[in-house]
Amino acid sequence: MTTRVQLEIFEGPLDLLLHLIKKNEVSVTDIPIATITEQYLATLELMQSLNLDVAGEFLVMAATLIHIKSRMLLPVAGADDEEEEEAGADPRAELVRRLLEYQRFKEAAEQLEQREVLERDVFVRCAASTERPEPAGFREVSVFELLTALRRVLERLPKNAVHEVTLERITVREKMTLLLDMLRSTPQVIFDALFAKLKTRMEVVVTFLAMLELVKMRAIRIFQDRPGGSILIERAKAPEGAASLVPAEPD
Amino acid sequence: MEREELKSILESLLFVADGPLTLQRISDVVDGVERSELRAALEELQSELERRAAGIRLMEVAGGYQMRTAKRNAEWVKKLLGGRPPRMSRATLETLAIIAYRQPITKAEIETIRGVDVDGVIGTLLERNLIRAVARKEVPGRPFLYGTTQEFLQLFNLKDLSQLPTLKEMEELAPPVVESEQARLEGED
Amino acid sequence: MEREELKSILESLLFVADGPLTLQRISDVVDGVERSELRAALEELQSELERRAAGIRLMEVAGGYQMRTAKRNAEWVKKLLGGRPPRMSRATLETLAIIAYRQPITKAEIETIRGVDVDGVIGTLLERNLIRAVARKEVPGRPFLYGTTQEFLQLFNLKDLSQLPTLKEMEELAPPVVESEQARLEGED
């Protein structure tokens, strides 16, 4: 029996119990507690032997099951006066209630999934209408929504594709854009002149990092006009022969 | 206004709307037309689209009307739009179902029902705007009480929460504790 | 494939597309159908919509085929949309987030991250002045590098880009986010 325990991913101890109950074709309201406890413990052992992380909740349930099992074995001592209320109550009652309740929501979840789910079964228009009177702005959005959008994108990516860059301070990125702007109006900038204007140490570091990043992505070029001469920064030039193939820049 | 003309206008409005349009909103725009007339025209439009097995359907969701693609064309639409929709895990769906039926509800209460920790799942649901914190429960720690959003209704093509299928024997099995809590909360907010 | 089924699929595709669809693009999606057959179905769809005086029409515009509202309903459409600027679509917001956090960045790089074509969205963002081409990347093809604009900062009410929160900060701020989310939802409905 135990060797054939299917290794599904169980959502939790209640899920595992429901699975065992279904497998044994018994009723939730009349659980053969000894059998189910044995199989439950065997499953936990199997999970552990496979180095699956068995969460604490599974162990708590194991203890509960063992406790119920032991209470079931006790004779219903002197139950005459107490009636069903205390000693005579089925020790499984609370567990049964929890199982039934959980099962109910499990079914509800399945029903939800069977509905026409947006962006899986049905779709709405995603384009902002093209026929607005004038291209007005967008409705106000909070930066948190923007960040949430980014996080959504990152979560869809395979884990190793999420660069540590996403956590970096945005300042370097901003500086990169500003540097490119500067180079648009002034074709060449002298390195020393650029850094002389910076006031704080932080600014120097950020500017330098931005510069390196731009060199790496081949958007700018850093060179000396002659050996020992000033260091110059300019926008990278198109590779030979490429220039004529592309249209002029907008604006 | 002729019925056909009205339907044409409604089609245009529903096409450009960026979310479900309530009857109220439609009625504000197409003024001078009785609501009953509007409703009749919307229903006619709806059934015509069904009958033609059109690629666009008119659905009642989240308290309003919205145009959506026909379900049977889903594969093609997905191919055009690319990207995989975020698949909802069983844990997410179960937690969402519990919140939907038992709202407002705290994280701890959800955990009691599911028997496991739901921290991560709650975060995902909040981020996807499917649930929101509606209040705090006045117990030690003042935990958030969660409820579902308009986006939830839209996601599952529900007109309102009453469209959720009823849970079997819910009332009989709900522990009295939960009910009295509910009563206390209602008195509060 | 039956003609009616094809027309239904085309309707769905044209409905969700975020810009005009070229015959090429349609043919890439609905593969296995002759281009001549596609063209015939599109024409049929077009004339049916005209004949019904439908609220949605199929137009051939510069870039391809696009669904638009019927011109004669323009007044009503304007009345619906008037005064209320549109909400940013998810695709737009995601693309904008990538550009904001990873600028300067090329279209191809954005597409790698989002996993889908972003032509239409980039167009919208440029048109709304939320992004701009800041330079070209000196690699074959010399693609534009995009960055955000002053208007971007204004839209998000930021003094400068350094005010953008980092992902780490957002996680730390989780509860307040929930509350502001709530405020936003309540303000909307």
Image (cartoon, coloured by chain):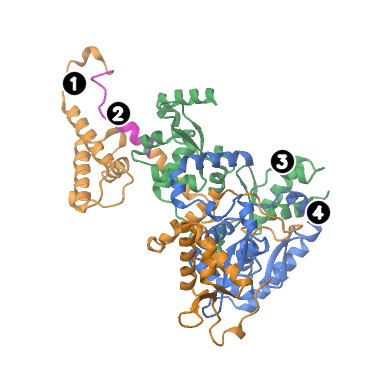
Chain colours: A orange, B green, C blue
Spatial separation of the CA atoms under disc 2 and disc 3? 50 Å
Q: Quadrant of residue B119?
A: top left
Report crowding for label 1: few under 14, some 14 to 19, many 20 or more residues within 10 A (C-alpha).
Answer: few
Residue extent of the magenta highlight: A85-102
Name the residue beneath numbered marker 2.
A93
Q: Amino acid at mark 2?
A: Ala
Residue A124 among magenta residues: no
Tag 1 secondary structure: loop
| Marks 2 and 4 share the same chain | no
Spatial separation of the CA atoms under disc 1 and disc 2? 16 Å
> C140 or A135: which is nearer to us?
C140
Question: Is residue B98 shown left or right of residue B67?
Answer: left
Name the residue beneath numbered marker 3.
B24
| Marks 1 and 2 share the same chain | yes
Name the residue beneath numbered marker 4.
C75
Q: Amino acid at mark 3?
A: Gln
Q: Which mark is residue A76?
A: 1
Instruction: Tell me, yes or no, whether the two marked residues, 2 and 4, touch with CB atoms within 8 Å.
Output: no
Tag 4 secondary structure: helix
Tag 2 secondary structure: helix
Spatial separation of the CA atoms under disc 2 and disc 4? 66 Å
Q: Is residue B83 visible?
A: no
Mark 1 or mark 3, which is nearer to you? 3
Q: Is residue A151 visible?
A: yes
Spatial separation of the CA atoms under disc 4 and disc 1? 81 Å
